[in-house]
Amino acid sequence: MSKMGDEDQAQRRRGRGRSPSRTAENIKVFLRVRPFNEREVKEGAKPTFVCDYRENVVMLTKPPEKRAGNDTDRSLFTLDHIFPPNSTQLDVYRLAAAPLVEQIFEGYNATIFAYGQTGTGKTFTMTGNDKDPELKGIIPNTFIHIFQKIANSTEDRSFVVKVMYLEIYNEEVRDLLGKDPNKQLQIRERQDIGIYVKDLTGYTVEDGETMHQLMERGNKNRITRATNMNDYSSRSHAVFTIVVETRHKERNQTTTGKLNLVDLAGSERVAKTGVIGIGLRESGNINQSLLTLGNVIQALVENSNFIPYRNSKLTRLLTDSIGGNSKTTMIAMVGPAESNFEETISTLRYAHKAKHVRNSAKVNMQQGGGMIQQFENEIAELQQKLALLTTASEAKQKKKVKTDADLEKMRKAETELKKIDDEKQHLEERMSMIQKKIICGGENLLEKAQEQELLITHSVKEIINLERNHQVLEEQYNRMTEKKTDIEGKYSSLQEEDTDLTRKIVTVQQRIKEAKDEHAERENEYQREMEALNDNNRLLVREMQLSSLMIDHYIPPEYKQMIQNHCTFNNDTQEYQLQGVAYTGNNMRKQQAVTEENPRITFDMKQVYHKYPEKKKVTNKRSLLKTYSAVPKPTR
Ligand SMILES: Nc1ncnc2c1ncn2[C@@H]1O[C@H](COP(=O)(O)OP(=O)(O)OP(=O)(O)O)[C@@H](O)[C@H]1O
């Protein structure tokens, strides 16, 4: 592997190591939607997306001429937060920037990127408009925040705030605060401090106003150009860096937090921007470096072995911000018009990918050392020199009195004294200048009355804003609680429904079982009845056979016919009845008392019909069943 590759891997390992003091978290991605601009309103532009601001989802739809009539016509992206077109600069600052400014006081590195198509509001978001305090962007708002934080901190802390401002134009690093902004600077790397820009001017500042002046000076040096898409299009990537060193006196600990505020040049299509000549080269370089940034993001997301940080100055300089030791936020800017569909979807894809990049930030802390220590040492040295000069000056004064007579010597002594006094004054000035660089927590408030006024105005605004945010949060909370109650209600009613259903199922199952038992019982009963009926039937058939046998053998056929003719069926009694039955043979036989002389004559027919079997006495219970016969019962 090449040396270049080795270094890249080393950087990656440094950035993504698993030291316990590191905080691993994904890059946060916010989306800011620019309102329709004048041109778009005039053209009657239609929106190309809709947002669900509660869920932070944006749904993009292709313009009609590009639609395929299927799922590919729509794309959904979820971001960490979406700022609607009517969001204020303070809304953006509070949510996207303020938490990171707080973190640099803890000793973390932080980065805020503004990314997006040309003319979508990157510079507006990062720098804003100075004429109206309400329109101040993230960079000037951080000045106020930082000095407000210092003014409110305890006296056991001292701070040094340093700023730097550079731009990357056509792949050249330029110092926006240097004596010669056109001079090309080199990016270097050192084991102890990591990646840095050699000879970049750093200003130690003691108030927000100075910071503001420096920012304005740097902005004037930035290269902008009018294009078809933006009257003041930034042709470079600008990085405003604020370093805050905090010294905890009692613990003798120093933390150093670095905040990079990056206003990227806008991705653009030459056909749309209409740039020519120099502008064309700028455009090529802008797109190339943004492409490399995209490739770095892609490689990190894919956990690739090689991250092409060195393929552009931008990614090389911001190695720690993307996938390294930094807490990073990207604010993606989009314009709402349908004509920008391609650029908007590309920005959203870029942003969505960046959301998956994992950074691992650590507190940059050291015992003693740092800029504060350096300044304090310098002050102590100056104080020593001053004390020596004072002694020398006093000695000269005494000598002057003794050598009063000698005019020449006196003049010489006076010149020396003046030199000493000048040097003393110079030392005193330098000392006070260095002392001013160290700002003590809670100090310098009276000296900065004007600035404080500004802070107070902003604090009031912040409080109003805080209240507004609080209200929004409260509303969100109430909505969530309502939702929760609703879900809980639904859940408990579902549970009740479930219990009820289970109970019903048990009852139904019980009924089915009962019905089955009853059915089985009935079937048995039916079976028994059928068997009884069959038995009965069999008996009847036998009786019929007997009757037929007797009739056929004892009653002559002409009598049988005659008797049959006189038989009628009585429906009420369900019996055949014989007319004049009272006069039939059996009834007409004279009844005689049974005596010894006149015994009952029994007809023993056994000897006649000796072949007939003895008739068995029927004891079977079935014989008790009622039977019907058409034959009149014999009377005894
Ligand atoms: N949220 C906003 N509200 C009102 N005006 C806006 C907003 N965003 C951008 N603008 C206006 O749109 C114009 C273009 O904005 P700006 O210069 O910030 O775009 P940019 O993304 O930095 O463009 P470039 O990449 O070309 O530098 C400016 O006039 C700016 O004031």
Image (cartoon, helix red, strand yellow):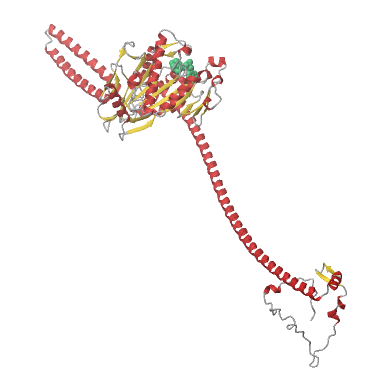
Residue found 69% across the figure and 77% down from its top: 618
Could you say which is closer to the camera, residue 63 or residue 247?
63
Residue 469 x, y percent position in the rendering: 48, 30
Q: Is residue 251 above or below residue 534?
A: above
Q: Quadrant of residue 278?
A: top left
Residue found 19% across the figure and 14% down from its top: 420
Residue 389 x, y percent position in the rendering: 18, 17
Tell me the quadrant of the picture where the C terminus can be found.
bottom right
Could you say which is closer to the camera, residue 500 or residue 169?
500
Q: Is residue 350 above or below residue 479?
A: above
Q: Quadrant of residue 411?
A: top left
Could you say which is closer to the camera, residue 551 or residue 297?
551
Question: Is 297 left, or right, of 524 in this rendering?
Answer: left
Q: Residue furthest top?
A: 408
Residue 581 x, y percent position in the rendering: 86, 75
Residue 509 x, y percent position in the rendering: 58, 55
Q: Quadrant of residue 207?
A: top left
